[in-house]
Amino acid sequence: MEELKGKEEVKTENIDLIDFDAVLKKKRAALFFKRCFDIFASLFGLLFLAIPFVFIAIAIKTSSKGPVYFRQERVGKNGKLFRIFKFRTMVSDAESKGMQITVGADSRITKVGKFLRKTKIDELPQLINVLLGQMSFVGPRPEVPHYVELYTDYQRNVLRIKPGITELASIIYKDENEVLAQSDDPEKTYIEEIMPKKIEINMEYIQKMNVFYDIKLIFKTFAAVLE
């Protein structure tokens, strides 16, 4: 697989540098059990959701033209590229009609897609990525290459673990689309304000991660969706 190159510049202001080599060395056992949990939970989830997935696929196909799944290149562990699975929530040629981030009531979102996004059901096909070992249940959300190219060398440490379906940063910034909608330059706001804060939160996660903490964040995600 391809690997993205990081920038040489390292910005360290207002950041307590973390020795990620030491942290990950201590987390070897946690990472092993995390992967075991991912395999069994994703396999169970895919089997349990097989029939609901069929009905969701029918709803997507009958409500708008295009494929059931949205496949997009994202950056995974160690900068390796992979294609993420999501239920399609936008018109089929959405990327040619706007930014790679979603802002407010984006006109590209379909009626069914609006419901899938609100309930986070559109993320469930990523269980396939988890089972394949490209993702984990919990971890930094995988970014598109365009944004990862803007990371400093230090920020690229978040790529030292597998990306996840959910993360604490996504729970904290669950209203991100609405915040960006209020900006005169949504992409600039995302790059300069939101993205760096998410990266810092994910760096803290790496220090805390274990199966029990992951389960706690999964339940927090459910609670955030139901609010």
Image: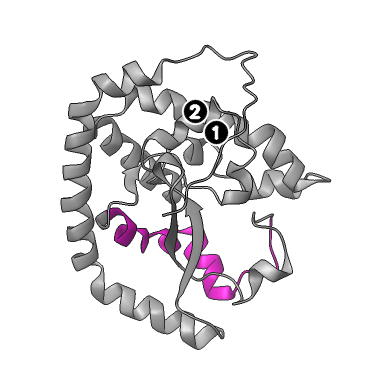
What is the CA distance from the residue labelled 2 to the residue labelled 1? 5 Å
Judge from the rendering whether residue 49 lies leftward or rightward of residue 95; answer left or right.
Answer: left
* Residue occupying image coordinates x 30% and y 53%: 130
Q: Residue 39, how many percent across, how many down?
A: 19, 51
SS of the residue under disc 2? helix
Residue for badge 1: 198
Mark 2 and mark 1 residues within 8 Å of each other at the beta carbon: yes
Q: Residue 194, how many percent across, how many down?
A: 64, 36
Near mark 1 (Cα within 10 A), the count class, few <14, some 14-19 or many ≥20, is some
Q: Quadrant of residue 139?
A: top left
Nearer to me, 10 or 30: 10
Judge from the rendering whether residue 25 lies leftward or rightward of residue 177; answer left or right.
Answer: left
* Residue occupying image coordinates x 18% and y 36%: 32
Check the image and name the residue furthest to the right.
184
SS of the residue under disc 1? helix
Is 127 part of what is drawn in magenta? yes
Write down the region rendered in magenta.
104-130
Residue for badge 2: 201
How is the model colour-coded? one colour
Is 58 part of what is drawn in magenta? no
Q: Residue 148, how many percent across, how many down?
A: 58, 42
- The answer to whether residue 29 is above or below residue 70 is above
- Name the quadrant of the N terminus: bottom left
Give, as a three-letter code, the residue at label 2: Ile
Q: Residue 97, how many percent across, how many down?
A: 72, 69
Give, as a three-letter code, the residue at label 1: Lys
Q: Quadrant of residue 196?
A: top right
- The answer to whether residue 16 is above or below residue 73 is above
Judge from the rendering whether residue 124 lies leftward or rightward of residue 133; answer left or right.
Answer: right
Nearer to me, 42 or 175: 42
* Residue occupying image coordinates x 68% and y 61%: 105
